[in-house]
Amino acid sequence: MMKNLKYSYWTSTIEAFKKNKLALFFLYTIIGLIAFIIIQPYLPNQKSPVAIYIDKATGFQLINRPPSKEFWFGTNSIGQDMWARIWAGTRMSLLIGFTVALWENFIGLMVGLVWGYVRRLEGIISTIYNVLNNIPKTIILILLAYTLKPGVLTIIFVMCITGWLDTARLVRNLVVIIRDREYNIASRILGTPGYRIAYKNILPYLVSTLVLKISLSIPAAIGYEVFLTYIGLGLPVGIPSLGNLINEGRGYITVASLRYQLMIPAIVLSIITVSFYTVGNAFADASDPKNHF
Amino acid sequence: MREKKPLLSIEDLVIKFQLKDQIVEVIKGLSLNLYKGESLAIVGESGAGKSVLVKSLIGVLDKNGWIDAGKILYKGMDIAKFKSEDEWLKIRGKEIAMVFQEPMTALNPLRTIGSQVEEAIVLHQGLRGREARKEAIRILEDVGIKDADKLYKRYPHEFSGGMRQRVVIAIALACKPQILICDEPTTALDVTIQAQILKLLNRLQEEYNLTILYISHDLGVVAKVAHRVAVMYKGKIIEVGNVKDIFYRPKDPYTISLLSKLP
């Protein structure tokens, strides 16, 4: 009982999260990775991720060199430095991942709140949701990626336009559960305007779910980028991203000596995905007040 | 105690509900006057329409119900004609507030007691920051929560049922209403706490010059708190009168049978 005297939701959430050592390890992995890709271009002896390196003695491009002192992760089939490209690609992929995750969940949250709380709009939004949701996501992605100019903004836009649907439905279901609890009716009867009930009484209930959704959206968006680039509809070849790197490396899967060009970006992708997934799940558990005692 | 002109006047109210394949008339031409400063108890068995009547006063009838005819006059306005939420926001809280029967669910479990009282003060009295907090503590102490400043940051689960009901009453009072509706305010509480809460409501009524409308099926509670009693049966008021008249000289056969079932 003494312990509850100063109960605070966020302190307890962090306490509960810290107990999960594996999640803590992956959280540090994410922080370390993000810190590293930010400072990496400013470290000494870094090469450009797009420049093509040429052997001065022969005048030929330094193609497909295995990892060495000069090129830490080797070079690719046209003589670019893999080390620089991997980190530039990670940077690009994480940027896409974060942007998409924030936008699609923000849109989903807003639509979901209105959908669940404003009864007059329920029918209309349900119809729109059903129509959009019944078109396979991949077809929308492919069509848009085809028609728009390939680029970073396009790929972010394309993923946001389909991604909010899941969040919206999730939020809507939660709102419907919470909105008719007696204290919300009580609040309404005592003259609290609807937007205030949504903001003060309903939103706090969604925090843990949303955090989990965002942390799962990040690896999902990175995965989608890889997928789209892999089928040739993603980023142009000139922009290094994990998708582009894996796509390039894919050709050498059968050549043992060149397999590093596929393996290294694939390993980085796996680390990112597993880290975000583990951290997100652990946080969702920790933010549930039932796990605080 | 009573003024001649009623504060709230219900005239020939008819409320209907649309069910799957029929329309049910739940309130059948009900008339009732509520005078300033009095406490009126509406008694009746389950299904008599007590809750429906009360819900129509604050505009929270279920979606399939509507006011078919009649008037609810309050301060020159006909509440029965209100349509939009904006119109209702003028009435809810400021004029008519409500205390719920279930203190376990009427408070938001994620927010502190203090912030929930404070919110009503900010919304309805226009106070901010430290002043709002001071007023919230004053009201909490007024409803019998000692050391309110220490308990301010506590959550509802740390309070007992009786304490929570006091907080619920504090929130309703913080709106500074003219009329307080108490829907079975003590049903969920044990007997000793019931007596305390009823005593509290009696005291607050004088202190704040409140008009209270009780909804109850517990005649013991009614005898303790009400000045007047209205007996409701199948959507109609069949007898209205002073507590003593109703309890000792009931006229209507239904009232007699209701009283005869008292333990």
Image: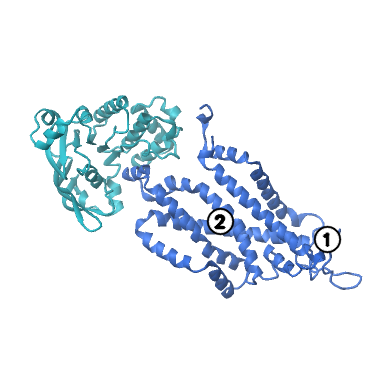
The answer to whether one can see residue A96 in this image is no
x and y, in percent, of residue A248 in the image: 73, 68
Q: Considering depth in this image, is A168 or B178 the residue closer to the camera?
A: A168
The reply, left or right, for residue A164 in relation to residue B121 is right
SS assignment at label 1: loop
x and y, in percent, of residue B222 in the image: 21, 31
The quarter holding residue B117 reads: top left
The amino acid pointed to by label 2 is: Leu
The local crowd at label 1, few if under 14, some if 14 to 19, many if 20 or more residues have their Cα within 10 Å, is some
The relative height of residue A206 versus residue B127 in the rendered view (above or below) is below
Q: Considering depth in this image, is A193 or A233 the residue closer to the camera?
A: A233
Tell me the tag on residue A102. 2
Instruction: For the C terminus of chain B, give its image quadrant.
Output: top left
The answer to whether one can see residue B199 in this image is yes
Tell me the tag on residue A141. none
The reply, left or right, for residue A178 in relation to residue A280 is left
The relative height of residue A279 versus residue A227 in the rendered view (above or below) is above
- Could you say which chain is coloured cyan in the image? B
- Find disc 1 in the rendering and name its residue: A67
- For the residues marked 2 and 1, what is the alpha-carbon distance in whole angstroms? 37 Å
The reply, left or right, for residue A169 in relation to residue A61 is left
Q: Residue at horizontal 47%, vertical 67%?
A: A134
The amino acid pointed to by label 1 is: Pro
